[in-house]
Image (cartoon, rainbow, N blue to C red):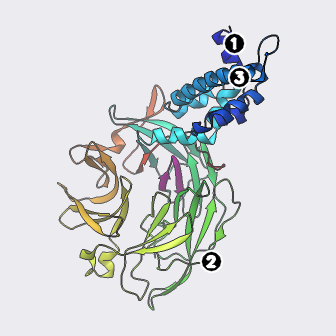
Amino acid sequence: MKSRGAKFREFCAIPRRTVRLIASSDFQQRRSIEAAVAVDSPMLGPVGGSMSSPSQKFRYLAKDAVAMISITECLIEILSWLPVRSLLRFKCVCKVWYNIISDPYFIRKHLHYSRKKPQLVIIPYSIDLCEIGFYNYSPTQLQAHLMFQKVFSEVPECFLCLQQVDGLLLLSTLDSLYVCNPSIGEFITLPEGSNHMPTHPYYRCFPEERAGFGYDARNKCYRVARYFYRWHDFKNKTYSLGLEVFDLGKDTSWRILGEDPPYPILAWIAPVSIDGVIYFRVDNGLHKFPPTGVVSFDLKDNKFKVIDRPSCFSSLDVCDDRQLDISELEGELCFVRESKNSKLDIWVHKEDDSWVHTYSIDFDCVHKFGELIGVREGKILLHVYDSHHRLDFCDSKIVLKDLKYYKAPNSYCSFDDETCFHVLRYVESLASVTTRV
């Protein structure tokens, strides 16, 4: 009888193709998997002698194959619950562990569990710094720990963090787009896109958020969608608008779609990405049609759809309409309006394209509203801009500059009043910015 150590060494000899088959969720094809194990791993045969019959040999191989499958199932399940930092170290244990942790099936399984325990990432930004740090926020200790730091050759101008999808962050400066996974330390610069005519008169101070980001489940790739104005005339309400896409791990340049967006897009409202659909806020001051709310772009088939705004906004003029924000809250599209009496109203979009007034939040002071972050323990989490950047849980307030930002275990830094902060819900992920998953 073989020892446990011998069986584990045999398991470690299984090639990556077999590991991927064993890791497959389709266990109805168990006999095919067992056969693959038998073919790929000659070490599963007897130590000495030969089998008396083919049926006896198959029973022997099947018994060991099932044992191997059981070991691998347990290993994959345990590893998929671990943080990314530990998994990156465990890739060095042996070749099989490296193959398992690098496999697309395991990456998706790990991501599934990571979504159940979302975190917050804080990105401080100062016009005097040539570096951007990504900090994982710990609410119980009022600390933030550095995950990854990117150093630029010069100070980035007007840095924005646009969206987070499956642990990948879409970032922007005035002239460039970047994609980063701070969990595994990957950072890439996207190629230059089509020429764009800015629509904001002070776009050097208020950069335009021109790109959306999401996952195309049909083609199994992450896709960036960037719109661009060829020209526009606000006086006569005419324009020419295009949209181009870039697939991570596949494209080397932007691809311009044959169909243009059906409405102009409001430049200073960030797009929202939910389940492979990107939502852009319509600029009702740049077209002659009846006002509407949102243009959605489905990444699976590259199709546009128009969604009207809540009916209670039908009487708003163009100036007030441009103050309506869109956001994502627990996987649902929201319209957000801040009234002059320090009240925040939130409408949630439903499948029948109706809107439901779900939240109304009163504030105890006059401030400039930031963005919705999520729901924590049944309470809305907001990133609020007033005299300070702060997190507001509706019952407690955390000033972001007062947190301890650790770059090393026993070394932390602080930021001054001139620092801006981006705050996003975040899930750890092994997804690479350079390969398809």
Q: CA gap, disc 1 to disc 2?
A: 60 Å
Q: Give the residues drawn in magenta, as a range.
A: 161-173
Q: Quadrant of residue 59?
A: top right
Mark 3 residue type: Leu
Check the image and report above or below for 338 versus 392.
Answer: below
Residue tagged 2? 258
Q: CA gap, disc 3 to disc 1?
A: 16 Å
| Number of residues whose C-alpha sits closer than 10 Å to that of mark 1, classed few (under 14), some (14–19) or many (20 or more) | few
Give the image location of residue 385, x and y in percent: 32, 55
Residue tagged 3? 61
One can see residue 218 in this view: yes
Q: Residue at x 48, y 70 (%)?
A: 203
1 within the magenta span: no
The answer to whether 131 appears left or right of 248 in the picture is: left
Residues under numbered marks 1 and 2 in contact, where contact means CB atoms less than 8 Å apart: no
Q: Nearer the viewer, residue 82 or 399?
A: 82
Viewer-nearest of discs 2 and 3: 3
Residue tagged 1? 6
Mark 2 residue type: Gly
Q: Quadrant of residue 6?
A: top right
Check the image and report above or below for 172 versus 21.
Answer: below
In the rendered image, the residue lying farthest to the right is: 49
The answer to whether 206 appears left or right of 31 in the picture is: left
Q: CA gap, disc 2 to disc 3?
A: 55 Å
Q: Secondary structure at mark 2?
A: loop
Viewer-nearest of discs 3 and 1: 3
Give the image location of residue 430, x and y in percent: 57, 40
163 within the magenta span: yes
